Amino acid sequence: MTLDADLLEQMKTWRRLIHRHPELAFDEYRTAGLVAEKLVEFGLDVERNIAGTGVVGTLRNGAGPSIGLRADMDALPISEENTFDYRSAHPGCMHACGHDGHTAMLLGAAAHLARHRDFCGTLHFIFQPAEEMAGGAGEMIRAGLFDRFPCDAVYALHNWPGLKLGHFAINPGPMMASLDTFEIIVSGTGAHAAQPHKGVDSLLCAATIVTSLQSIVSRSIDPHEALVVTVTQLHGGDAWNVIPASTVIRGTVRAMREVDRQLAKRRIREIAGNTAAAFGATADVRHIDGYPPTVNTSRETDLAIAAARRVVGDGAVEFDCVPSMASEDFSLMLQRRPGAYMWLGVDGDAHVAPLHNPHYDFNDQALGYGAGFFVEMARGTRY
Ligand SMILES: [Zn+2]
Ligand SMILES: [Zn+2]
């Protein structure tokens, strides 16, 4: 499968234009405008302003399955340190996760499929806002995404530095971890530092809780499973001679399985509450649910592998890759619809900088592979 040469050039132009003008979560007005304008130009039915800046383009060709193909459009609050001419024109904001590339690839696939119409069924091209931390996928679902645009299955790609250009990787089952955060406020009784017996030391209690939280990974979870419990903040006291009345602990939990995610949540509450009680203090635990694990369904994983193989050949598709402890809000779509999420290699002769790095830049040579994957996904799915 080869994409038309003019589309390869156009994708590069769109990608660099989007890179030059990055926009943060839910602020992707210019990007969404470009996307909608192009989709209309290709002849798709276009719905704008879904959950703010979300756009869906629909293409129909007779009877067949209804497939959702998704790209994310948002950038990150990072100051770009690249010097090429299409570097970010907006200080403090850059496409450091390659969502400019994702958007351009899905536009390229839409252009190809609208031109050739060599598929059967309905395609929904989903351009979502706010993948980075703000849960744009969830907002689009709440805005009726799957009621307005019914999908039998959904598919997405993420570019992956470290994976060779022209390669794809996928794991049947968990692919990315969940992301939750927690806050524990430990309350004791303030006292003079020289008279600890007259107070309840919230700082000592909090320090004990931080240490004990490490036992969740080492003692509560099956050693074959992956889980991260990281404390990232510990705030208590502001004087040399005062035992603080309260101390705050904050951190994050990453899990590959929902059952471990829930277990970590329960253990954090138990450890904090019971440790505080042992010290005569109290612990107020707040857990903020972020993204669930990104879990591919088996049939759709097989279909995605087959589509990728039609683009790059059998040997370039890794189908049991080691999942990442990073996370992805496409997981929210996969909670509601079968589907698969794949990584796309971008490392050419030179390594691409890591995601979220100020020197990162999406490798334009990967555009044809990514767009090719979406085209093959659309052409090859039979239900
Ligand atoms: Zn990112
Ligand atoms: Zn990303």
Image (cartoon, rainbow, N blue to C red):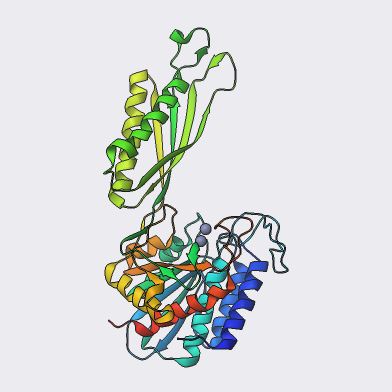
Along the viewing direction, whichever of 181 and 12 lies nearer the viewer: 12
Which residue does the image show at 36% across and 91% down from the upper left? 62
Please tell me how many numbered marks the rendered image carries.
Answer: 0
- The residue positioned 61% from the left and 82% from the top of the image is 10
324 to 108, vertically: above or below: above
Q: Relative to 85, is 96 on the left or the right? A: left
- Quarter of the picture containing the C terminus is bottom left
Residue nearer the viewer, 301 or 283: 301
Task: Using the rendered image of the protein, determine whether residue 160 is visible from the camera's viewpoint.
Answer: no
Q: Is residue 270 visible?
A: yes
Where is the N terminus found, in terms of image quarters? bottom left
Q: Residue at x 44, y 59 (%)?
A: 328
Does residue 294 sit above or below 55 in this rendering?
above
Residue 14 appears left or right of 276: right
* Residue 59 in the image, given as x and y percentages of width and height: 44, 85
Q: Position of residue 291 (x, y in %)?
A: 41, 54
Instruction: Give me the residue at 64% from left, 72% from top.
Output: 16
Classify 52 as above or below 205: below
Q: State the image coordinates of residue 55 (x, y, percent, origin top left).
A: 51, 73
Q: State the image quarter where residue 208 is shown.
A: top left
* Lateral position of residue 194 relative to residue 329, left or right: right
113 or 309, which is in the foreground? Answer: 309
List x then y, in percent, for residue 281: 39, 21
